[in-house]
């Protein structure tokens, strides 16, 4: 008998036949936020601003112009776009598929454009799950600029609303603002383990 088996046997003997049932976990947390789509968008925008990120809004027919404006302001000339993301790229900008690219090659591009699985308004969190419109995790972690195109019907209020919509078997990446960290003196540094700049385009009219 191993030491582990011996310890467990002693515990069973001490407990006897009456083993205590596991305590039930209280389920008193909120499961809904009760906000309209426009209010959710406003809340998400506010949270993103708190993190130092920016959100632009546009209609379905304005996506091309909005993406173009964001890339022009950034001065981006080469951007990674996952194969499954159907987003128009302005003339003069090199669309890079991102597959296969090394970390060094990804670091050399001007940015990445992805979709998103969903966004959580209360926490200002964008969730990626590695779907075809988002690509592998490295695409959104290595380039210094991340432009995320998000449909407004993918915005939920709370984390508890998001969890049933996500597949735990997928590689989930939760993004709350640009990558940042602080040292022992609380000096904030951005871009340490992800993009230094996060920008979200919220496409309205998806509901």
Image (cartoon, grey):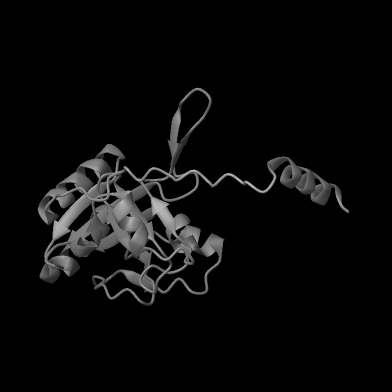
Number of numbered markers: 0
Give the residue at x 75% y 44%: 13
Q: Residue at x 62, y 46 (%)?
A: 18
- Which residue reaches farthest top? 185
Q: Nearer the viewer, residue 36 or 18?
A: 18
User: Residue 143 in the image: x percent, y percent?
Assistant: 44, 57
31 lies above or below 132: above
**Residue 48 in sight:** yes
Q: Which image quarter holds the N terminus?
A: bottom right
Residue 166 horizontal side relative to residue 65, left or right: right
Residue 182 image point, x, y percent: 47, 32
- x%, y% of residue 138? 49, 61
Say which quarter of the image contains residue 95. bottom left
From this view, report whether residue 198 is shown above or below residue 188: below
The answer to whether residue 146 shows anywhere in this view is no
Rendered residue at 27%/50% (across/down): 31
List the single residue furthest toward the front: 17
- Looking at the image, residue 124 sits to the left or right of residue 35; the answer is right
Q: Nearer the viewer, residue 31 or 42?
A: 31
Question: Residue 179: x and y, percent?
Answer: 42, 45
Q: Where's the C terminus, which quadrant?
A: bottom left
């Amino acid at each position: 008998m191993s030491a582990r088996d011996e310890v467990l046997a002693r515990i069973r003997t001490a407990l006897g036949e009456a083993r205590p049932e596991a305590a039930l976990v209280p389920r008193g947390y909120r499961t809904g936020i009760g906000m309209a789509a426009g209010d959710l968008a406003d809340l998400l925008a506010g949270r993103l601003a708190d993190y130092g990120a920016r959100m632009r809004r546009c209609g379905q027919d304005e996506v091309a112009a909005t993406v173009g404006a964001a890339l022009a302001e950034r001065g981006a000339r080469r951007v990674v776009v996952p194969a499954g993301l159907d987003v128009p790229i302005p003339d003069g900008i090199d669309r890079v598929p991102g597959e296969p690219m090394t970390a060094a090659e990804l670091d050399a591009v001007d940015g990445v454009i992805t979709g998103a699985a969903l966004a959580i308004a209360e926490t200002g969190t964008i969730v990626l799950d590695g779907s075809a419109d988002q690509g592998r995790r490295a695409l959104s972690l290595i380039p210094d600029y991340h432009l995320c195109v998000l449909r407004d019907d993918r915005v939920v209020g709370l984390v508890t609303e998001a969890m049933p919509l996500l597949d735990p078997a997928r590689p989930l990446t939760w993004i709350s603002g640009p990558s940042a960290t602080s040292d022992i003196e609380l000096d904030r540094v951005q871009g340490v383990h992800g993009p230094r700049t996060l920008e979200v385009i919220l496409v309205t009219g998806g509901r």
